[in-house]
Image: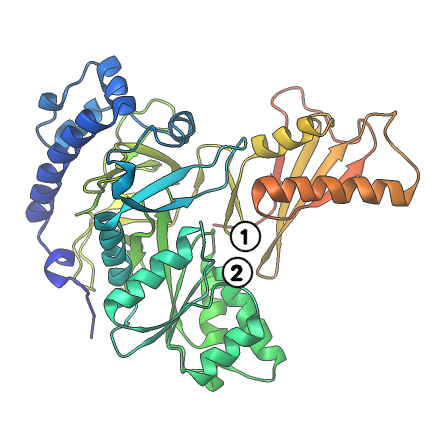
Amino acid sequence: MEKYFQKDIECADVQTIKGWQNEKLLRQVRNVWDNVPYYRNLMEKAGVIPEDIKSVDDISKLPFLSKADLRDAYPYGLLARPLSECVRIHSTSGTTGKRVIAFYNRHDIDLWNDCCSRALAAAGADENDVCQVAYGYGLFTGGAGLDGGSHKLGCLTLPMSSGNTERQIQFMRDLGATVLCCTPSYAVYIGEVLHEMGLSADDIKLKAGIFGAEPWTEEMRRDIEKTLGIKAYDIYGLTELSGPGVAFECSAQSGMHINEDHFYAEIIDPDTGEVLPEGEKGELVFTSLDKEAFPLLRYRTRDICVLKREKCPCGRTHIKMCKPMGRSDDMLIIRGVNVFPSQIETVLMKMGYSANYQIVVDRVGATDTFDVYVELPGDQFSDTVREMTEKESALSGALKTMLGINPKVHLVQPKSITRSEGKAVRVIDKRKLV
């Protein structure tokens, strides 16, 4: 039997959903106009005032926000509430040293918990379940989001965070965990360690897993389901909006339902900004309809996907988004971490290296590999293995400090990286993610 956390909302008719969106959008536009000078300035430049927005049909009149705006307004420029009302921040890694910070007041955290509770219920969880949260905690949104949703749903929550996999499995067995929340690659690794310990899916009680924060394929889904003996559900979110729970899969596993009472979704042409009709592939844009502390209007996610509203066997009526098919910018997601080539270039220049570099990403088993090849000027290249190893280690450490993830650095001879007559090929992504 299908489970829901807020059935009246999740299964509301489309006209009711649109009514909620109209009411909330008007209130949010006024909130931002009155309390966020940065966005009010963008509206004024676009020649739009709150009275011009009468329903979601007018949303295309509003200007877009991008990650660049979040950096320009860092840290407090997009706050819509006094700092004294804010109770938490979360953050992504910064593209040039500045991180993107999202603020939350108590209302926003409560809203976020609701969204994650819906995702857990859609995976079949209720107050009788034991939910093991193996996403990272701290500034990363994954652990906090599913932890809050699990508590609100009434599950016994195991706040394991990531790592120490044998202990994860011990707690999983001792406490009878039934739902696992982590990145898909970590789920695969847990399955591998389980096998190495001489155990199998029959030795654990897991029935479902909620996996997100990085791209994963249907082949990986089937592998996880077989190895752990579970049904694997996708979840989508952005730190800028409220982390995981913006959208989630139901039992149909045919796309993720967007929580439309909280987030209004559009698909646009990434080049022109024109809004595209339902069913067309383009860039996903979100408006947070009722976040108070850090409301974003028409935020460009850079994720490429398709929106479709169709009858779902689960009974939910909220529109579905497909799994993101790629990016309209140069961001990579490696082991759940956002990585921009510009971050790497920033570190190279600060440390006196040239901008001739190449990033190679691949996937071995379930784990992403991350290699950075950097050309050394002729006068710096050395035949001494020790000297080169020390330089590579120092550069790797500096990149880890910037990115939050440790690449393998290779210092190579001058002009050994293939030149291009057009745009430099900085990234080679060998993963098969679609």
Q: Quadrant of the N terminus?
A: bottom left
Which residue occupies 48% across, 81% down? 201
Name of the residue lying farthest toward the right: 383
Residue that appears at 54% across and 75% down: 167
Kindly indicate whether the residue at mark 1 contacts the one at mark 2 (C-beta within 8 angstroms): yes
Q: Position of residue 341 (x, y in %)?
A: 58, 33
Q: Type of residue at label 1?
A: Arg
Position of residue 216 in the picture relative to residue 380 (left or right): left
Q: On screen, 67 above or below 38?
A: below
- Left or right, 227 with respect to 30, comes to right
Q: Which residue is mark 1?
A: 335
In the picture of the structure, the residue carrying the numbered disc 2 is: 185
Find the residue positioned furthest to the front.
84
The residue located at (72%, 38%) in the rendering is 373
The location of residue 105, given as percent across then percent down, is 26, 46
Task: Give whichever of 421, 33 is nearer the camera.
Answer: 33
Image x and y of residue 381, in percent:
87, 31
- Residue type, mark 2 in image: Ser
Q: Residue at x 68, y 35 (%)?
A: 358
Where's residue 372, x and y in %? Answer: 69, 40
Q: State left or right for residue 398 relative to residue 337.
A: right
